[in-house]
Structures are given as C-alpha cells and as structure tokens.
Amino acid sequence: MPRRRGRDCQRFFTLEGVLSRGDQFARAIHCGGPGTGGADGNTYNVLDLTLAPGVASPTPRSFFTTSSCGVCGTASIDAVEKVSSYDVSSDGIQVSAHDVAAFPDRLREQQKTFDKTGGLHGAALFDVVTGELLVAREDVGRHNAVDKVVGWALLNDRLPLRGTVLQVSGRVSFELVQKAVMAGIPILSAVSAPSSLAIELAERAGLTLAAFVRGSSMNLYTRADRIRVPSTTPAATEVASVR
C-alpha cells in the first residue's frame, strides 16, 4: 500500500475489518524509492505489510485519499458496509445527557495544536462508567483523528470499546459511524450535523448517534435509550429533539 507509518497501517486495517487485536499484525517494512535497493526488487516508496498467520488478507479496493469524507474511496455503499467483529447494538451502557453535553468542551481542552493553528479536527474517547477521558487525538482530517483514537485502543488491547463514547469536533459522515461500529463503540457524539447515510447506518448497527451537541442541547437520532434525561430536571427540556 502507499507509504504510511506502521501504526497508521495498524489503525487502517483495524477500521477495514482486517484486525481486531494488536497481535494480528506482524510487521511493516519500509521499502525505499527507486534506486535505493528495496528488498525482493521492491524499489517503490511503499510499506510491505505482513499479517500474522491465519489473518485473512483484505479485499482490494481503491483509495483516492485517506482523509476523505463519507464514501469517496469506495465504489458503493455496499462496499463500505462491513461486518464488524463487535455487536454495538447489544451494549446496554447508559450515560447522562449532562455528561454528553460536557464532552465537547472536555475534548476542546485537549486540542493544543488547534489552539495554535485553528485548523485541526479532534476526537476523544470517554469511559461512561468513570467519566475518564481515555485518549484524545488531533489531525487535519477528522477521519484520521478517529483512526488515531482507535489505533490507541488496538495497541493497548482495549478493543472492543464497549461502555465508551466517541466525541468528535465536527460533523458526522457515514465513514465515522462505520469506524465507531468497527471498534465496538456504542455511542458517537458530534458538535455538528450528521449525514443522512450516517443516520441510516447508525440505525441499522444499533449505535447511538447524538449530534449538534452544543451547550445544553443536542439532537438524538438513533438509540436514544442510552442517553438518560431525567424528567424531573430542567435538563429534560434542553435536549432539542429525539429523531
């Protein structure tokens, strides 16, 4: 595949449904450009990847960019919808609307490079039970930021990410929902809008999708049963809508 760092490749193949554990990835060897004498005659600027014995090779498809939106790198929706190793619909975790409303600001506090440039997306993972921010990452592409979060989980043997919330700093495309499902994340929260395809996939996968999470309001599009909104408190009226 085109040159990417070894850990980037691990993240990539996890979200392509090839890897579900860190030990399924054997090695990544960089072969230099033409004239550098790459091993076995491979003289292009690529990484040769070796999967562990018994791990099936991925289905070939073309990628036009690694920070694309939605399904730009696939031939069709059907090509993107993969069978995840994890069933997010069975995760019975619940989180308060108050906690979800606080996640965007907690992510923002971790975005040090955004403070300097104003040009990076962010993604963070929260433990629902403890409220702990487990990891936060930034990247020029919001999809890559999520890849980094999932890569952290893979390298630390945290997959599947049951009982967690993935918070992202922008809008939600189909592909971000796919990444959450592939990693076993039951709840995805975003500060901006979801696409119609993102909502459709979240509904089919049983993932909770919260969007327009701003201040004390949010829209809940799928599996709203995971978000606790006490009817006896003012917060109940501050959840904008359930769709």
Image (cartoon, rainbow, N blue to C red):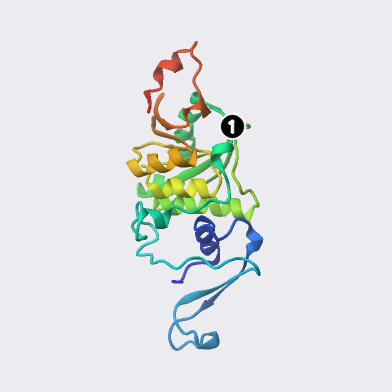
Q: Is residue 116 left or right of residue 163?
A: left
Classify 140 as above or below 184.
below
Crowdedness near tag 1: few (<14), some (14–19) or many (≥20) residues, C-alpha within 10 Å: some
Mark 1 lies on a secondary structure that is: loop
Quarter of the image for the C terminus: give it. top left
Looking at the picture, how far across and down is residue 109, in whole percent? 47, 38
Q: 128 or 5: nearer the eye?
A: 128
The residue indicated by pointer 1 is 93
Would residue 101 be seen by someone viewing this image from the given angle?
Answer: yes
Q: Residue at x 33, y 41 (%)?
A: 196
Residue visible at 60% across and 54% down in the picture = 154
Of residue 232 and residue 59, the one placed in the foreground of this image is 59
The quadrant in which residue 211 appears is top left
Whether residue 137 is visible to the viewer of this picture, yes or no, is: no
Q: Where is residue 124 in the image (x, y as percent from the top left)?
A: 50, 43
The residue at 47%/85% (across/down) is 43
Write the residue at 48% across / 66% down: 59
Q: In this view, does 190 lie to the left or right of 93?
A: left
The image shows residue 31 at horizontal and vertical percentages of 51, 79
